Amino acid sequence: MGTLGLTVMLAVATVKLSPGDQAVFAGLSMLVFLVANRLPGRGVTHFLIALSLAVSLRYIVWRITETLRFASWPEFVLGSVLVLAELYAIVVLVLGYAQTTWPLERKPLPLPDDPAAWPTVDVFIPSYNEPLSLVRATVLGALAMDWPRDKLRVHILDDGRRADFRAFAAQVGCSYLTRADNAHAKAGNLNAAMKVTDGAFIAVFDCDHIPTRGFLQFTLGWLVADDNIAMVQTPHHFYSPDPFQRNLAAGTRVPAEGNLFYGLIQDGNDFWNAAFFCGSCAVIRRRALDTIGGFAVETVTEDAHTMLKLHRRGWDSAYLRLPLAAGLATERLALHIGQRMRWARGMLQILRTDCPLFGPGLSFGQRLCYLQATGHFLFAIPRLVFLTAPLAFLLLGQNVIAASPLAITAYALPHIFHSVATNARLQRNWRHSFWSEIYETVLALFLVRLTVVTLLSPRRGKFNVTAKGGLLDGGFFDLRAVYPNIILALLLFGGIMRGAIGMALVDTSTLAFQAFALNCIWATLSLLIVMAALAVGRETRQVRVRARVAAELAVRLRLPDGHEVAAMTRDLSQGGARLITDAALDGMEGAPIRVQVPLAAETLDLPAQIRRRDGTALQIRWEPATLAEEAAVVRAVFSRADAWTSWADYPPDRPLVSLWRVLVSIRFLFRARSRAAAGRPHAAPAPAR
């Protein structure tokens, strides 16, 4: 059946048609999609994927066989670069479909009924130069996990060798580990801790990732049941907004940037036994790590490389699409770019030094998934090519596609339509259409040089930390993060103006007019994407020390006179909460109260102070006086089993609605600046890796 389907697909991709007939085929293929897409079921999804691949293969076959005729060396160079970028896009499309068509949707397995049979777990919390204020909640959350006390060992791995961290560890009763040097950064820190610990399993949390109480009970079941599973990974969920969500007008109405990877791609990887370690929020079997000499130190992405080595040795992996921990997203666009540059360098290092296509131990599916992961960050050069390709004609007068505008439209339009529409069906509420283009455009010009350098010299580069926890006392436009795209926007605008002049000077019935019009449309679409990327650089104020988390919990307030009133929380943070209550509390600003928060296994009694009241809304601030009360606040805000269950509560993708939200975000790039907009970073943010 598969052979027959492939034969039909290749036949559709290679049959020759005139531009007019191709336009009819394009219209029919889009009509078929619109009808079939209304039907549910994975079989329909597979059919639409096959249709998309047939249309895209048809486009690339046409490009290679009929459009590569060049009149000059500049046309040859520019045209060849464009078709290579298109080939890359087709390969990525094929790999993406293979990777995400069958998400496994693995469920947790129960542990043995007798807790005495549960294994020992070492919890590693590596830190370098992050402030203790950032790390405290993670340590307290780890200590609160539901696991036998004699089998849970929490360790602060302090590469900064700081006295206040040592004192805090002694105060809360966890282990404090350090080493003489900082060789191999985070991977070296983890390996050093392995030498002085002996738990059967190792749970790793970045120092800002706070686990829920049930983290170990949800994840260890698979590791206990299957001795060949080396690792169970869970999502990296962020309870604070990333730069796209915070800075773009429509940012909060679209899924977070990481949701596609943790909501769909890793689940798809799991189908192929190719889910990989992401550096945090995971549990790893110590015996498996011992077979490869510990965490990988050869690249700056020790996490993915470690799992690649384990897969080569025949170990399995598992992924649970349950957010069981949460951390801080990067606050500013410049920090986001720096973080992604490290990821790009590390993945390209793996591609060059331990290419998953070659070498022993991997299945075909694993090779495809790892190739997609390590090759993803090659996107920078093709993305730049696609954005600037119309300028070859508009500014340089070079015709890089030897075909009529009608033929280009008839072949390219269905390719783009089916790619966008089919991915919208696959990605549903994990990623909305056109936002990937914004994410990539923000990074592309920064990654071009890094991509070339890393491919040529993969040993270069070192691990760097990602700053988190910073404040902005006023909004500002971060030129450092967007200046390359400002230059690109000016070039595109100039190209569009040149095209408009060209159209005005030629007869509307000529091919020249059509060529100017087509390239102007292409350049305009590129400009819209670049402008949306520029809008992310418009940093908004960040004056709240603790990010608030939406949560609706029925609580009771005990007032200073002993009376109790009912209330409902609207949001919580490590610093306070917003409540709704009908009780008459006028004139009680500054009054101390106790807030009783019922959880599944206990009722927490938290000290607080009323800050202000506005109608039925009540703002309170936690006032923990002891370490036990601080730990109770952490359990109430971060450790609840249901704390992050709403992470995927976004509507399914509707491409036209998503496009409108992109346009809305661009419009806000030009809104009037407030007085605070002249501000600059309030203070140097706290690095966190």
Image (spheres, rainbow, N blue to C red):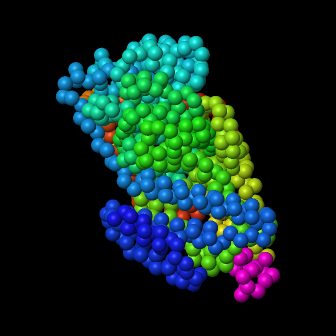
Q: Position of residue 554 (x, y in %)?
A: 30, 40
Instruction: Determine the residue positioned at 78% across, 71% down.
Output: 71
Query: Is 505 a magenta residue?
Result: yes
Dominant secondary structure of the residues highlighted in magenta in the image: helix
Q: Which residues are magenta?
A: 502-517
Position in image of residue 326 (x %, y %): 43, 37
Task: Return the residue nearer the eye: 297 or 33.
Answer: 297
Q: Quadrant of the C terminus?
A: top right
Q: Residue at x 55, y 80 (%)?
A: 17
- Residue 394 visible in rendering: no
Which image quadrant for residue 242?
Answer: top right
Q: Quarter holding the N terminus? A: bottom left
Image quadrant in which you'd find residue 119:
top left
Residue 344 in the image: above or below residue 490? above
486 up-or-down from 413: above or below: above
| Residue found at x 30% / y 30% | 227
